[in-house]
Image (cartoon, coloured by chain):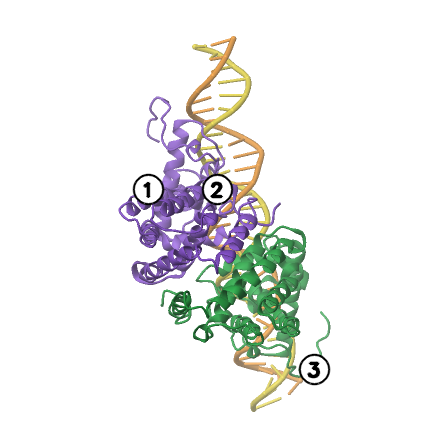
Chain colours: A green, B purple, C yellow, D orange
Amino acid sequence: MEPSGPPEPRPGRTDSETGVARDRVENTTARGDERKALILDTALRLFERDGYEKTTMRAIAKEAGVSVGNAYYYFGSKDHLIQAFYDEVSERHVAQALAAMRPHRDLATRLSADLHTWIDVAEPYREFATQFVKNAVDPNSPLSPFSPESKPTRDKVIDVHRRAVLGSTAKYDPGIAENLPDLLWMHHMAIVLFWVYDRSPGARRTRELVDRTSPMVARIIGLSRFKVVRPLFREADKLIRDFLLPGDEPGGA
Amino acid sequence: MEPSGPPEPRPGRTDSETGVARDRVENTTARGDERKALILDTALRLFERDGYEKTTMRAIAKEAGVSVGNAYYYFGSKDHLIQAFYDEVSERHVAQALAAMRPHRDLATRLSADLHTWIDVAEPYREFATQFVKNAVDPNSPLSPFSPESKPTRDKVIDVHRRAVLGSTAKYDPGIAENLPDLLWMHHMAIVLFWVYDRSPGARRTRELVDRTSPMVARIIGLSRFKVVRPLFREADKLIRDFLLPGDEPGGA
DNA sequence: AGTAGAAGTTGAACACGTTCAACTCGGAGG
DNA sequence: CCTCCGAGTTGAACGTGTTCAACTTCTACT
C-alpha cells in the first residue's frame, strides 16, 4: 500500500460527530479512519456500479486491497455499509434542502423543494436504496428508522421538515404544531416508498407525485383551523403522540 | 415412502383456484399436490416454531422427508413459501372478516371488526410476518403486494374492504366510491406495518390503534360530502387512480 | 406388455455472508 | 536495541440459499 505518513491525529468525520457508535470500532488511530473510509468508499462505488446484491464482500475487499475479515473489522455486516450510506445521503439532503427552501415562503413550495432535493441526492442509488428500505422494515435491524442507531440521522431529517413549516407563512391549529414535523416525515417516507418502486427515467413519476401531494398536504394542514374538523386533527395529533413518539418501538419494549 | 394409492385425480387446493401460477410447477398430478402441501405445511410449522431465519431449507426438507432439491422443485425459493403462507392467512381472514362484519351497519365498527379479525388470524405468525413485510417491499420480489403474483390474493382482500363500505350506512361523496376500497387497503397496510413492530402481548397496542383509527377513517370518509373539502377528496381520488391503479408498478414499466 | 417421454427426485457442488484462531506490526517501556 | 502487547489483519472454514446434471418413477400410447 502507499506509505502511511506520521500518525498525526486528523479530525475528519469521526463517530463522535453523529453521537452514536454505528460500527464495530469506535475511533482509534488515524490509519484506522483512513482504512475505514477507503472500504466504505469502495463499497459505495461498487454498489452504485453493480447493485447491492451483486456486489460481494469479497469483491469489495479485493477492490479496496484488503482482506474480507478486515472489512468486517470495521463494519459489522454488509448492512452496516448501507447505514453509512444512508447517513451520507441524509447529510447531503439536509444541507441542500435548507438552501432550496430558503427563497420560498409558501409551505407547499417549501415541501416540494425539500422532497425534490431528496430525490436529487438519492437518485443515483435507487436500486441500492431498495435494499435499504427493505432492511429498514425489519425491527431487529440497526437500519430500522426506529432503531436507536439511526435516531441521530432521522432527527436531523425531521428537523428539516420542522424548518419547512416554521419558515413558511402557513396557518394552522397551534395545538398540532409540535407533531407536524413527524407527520411530514411520514409523507416523506411514503414518497420514498413510491420512489423505490418507480422505474421511470429520472424518477419522473415520483417528482410528479411530489408536485401533486405537497399542495395537498399543505392544504390539509391549513384545514386544521376549521372548527368542523379540528377535533379530528386533535385526535390525530394525540394518536401520533401516543403511538409514534413515546418509545423507540410502537409496541413499547 | 408410504405406498402411493391409485392415481385418481383429487380436486384439493389447486393453483387454478387462485388463478395464478405462484410457484415453479403449475398443477399436475395428485401426488404432486400432496407433496407440495406436505412441504408447505412442514415449512409453516417450523417457521412458527423457530422463526423464519432460523429455519433452514435443509431442515424443512429433512422434516418433510424430502430432498432439498425437491422442495425447490415445488417452491422457487424460500420466499415463495411465504407467499403461500400469505395466501393462506388472507383466505382465512377474508372468510372470518365477512362474518365478523355482518351484524354491524356502522362503518367504523365494520372496519374495526375487519382489522381485528386480521390480527386474530395473523397473530401466531408475527415474527414470521416481519420477513414477509420485509420482502414485500422489494419491487423485484414476487412477494411485493404490487406484483402480479400476489394480485389475486390482494384483490380478494381489497374486496373485503369494498363490502365493508357497501354493507354500511355510511354516507360519502359518490365520486370517490370506486377507489375507497384502495384507500382502506392502505389503512390496512399501515396497521400491518405497525403490527410488525408491535411487541406488546397479543398485539394489544395494534388493537388499540385499530380502535382509534377506524372511527377516524370513517369520519374522514364522511367528510367527503362537505363542499369545503370536496375538491381535496376529488384530488386525492384522482391521485389514487393515476398513481396506484394504472400499471402493476407505480413507475410504469 | 413395452417403451418413449414427461414428471418427479436426488444430493453434491457453488457462491455468498460471516466467523475466528492465528498471525503481523508499530510503538511504548525497559 | 530488545520485548511485549494490543490494534490491526489475514484467509481458511462454516452454514446458508440455491442450482443442476443425473437418476427414478409414472403416464400415455402403441
In the structure shown, which secondary structural element does the residue marked by tag 3 occupy?
loop
- Frontmost residue, A195 versus A169: A169
Quarter of the picture containing the N terminus of chain A is: bottom right
**Residue at 34 percent of width and 48 percent of height:** B168
Q: Mark 3 and mark 1: span between their CA atoms?
A: 72 Å
Residue A70 appears left or right of B225? right
**Residue at 52 percent of width and 78 percent of height:** A19
Q: In the image, which is nearer the foreground, mark 3 or mark 1?
A: 1
Q: Quadrant of residue A49?
A: bottom right
- Frontmost residue, A164 versus A155: A164
Q: Which residue is mark 3?
A: A6
Residue A8 appears left or right of B133? right
Q: In the image, which is nearer the foreground, mark 2 or mark 3?
A: 2
- Frontmost residue, B123 versus A163: A163
Q: Which is nearer the N-term, disc 2 or disc 1?
A: 1
Is B56 situated above or below A4? above
On the image, the x and y values in percent for residue B86 come to 41, 45
Q: Mark 2 and mark 3: span between their CA atoms?
A: 62 Å
Is A51 situated above or below A26? above
On the image, the x and y values in percent for residue A225 come to 46, 70
- Tag 2 and tag 3, C-beta contact below 8 Å: no
In the structure shown, which secondary structural element does the residue marked by tag 1 occupy?
helix
Can residue B63 be spotted in the picture?
no
On the image, the x and y values in percent for residue A190 come to 52, 59
Q: Which residue is mark 1?
A: B95
Q: Amino acid at mark 1?
A: Ala
Q: Which residue is mark 2?
A: B151
Chain at tag 1 = B
- Frontmost residue, B66 versus A79: A79
Mark 1 Cα-neighbour bin, 10 Å: few <14, some 14–19, many ≥20: few
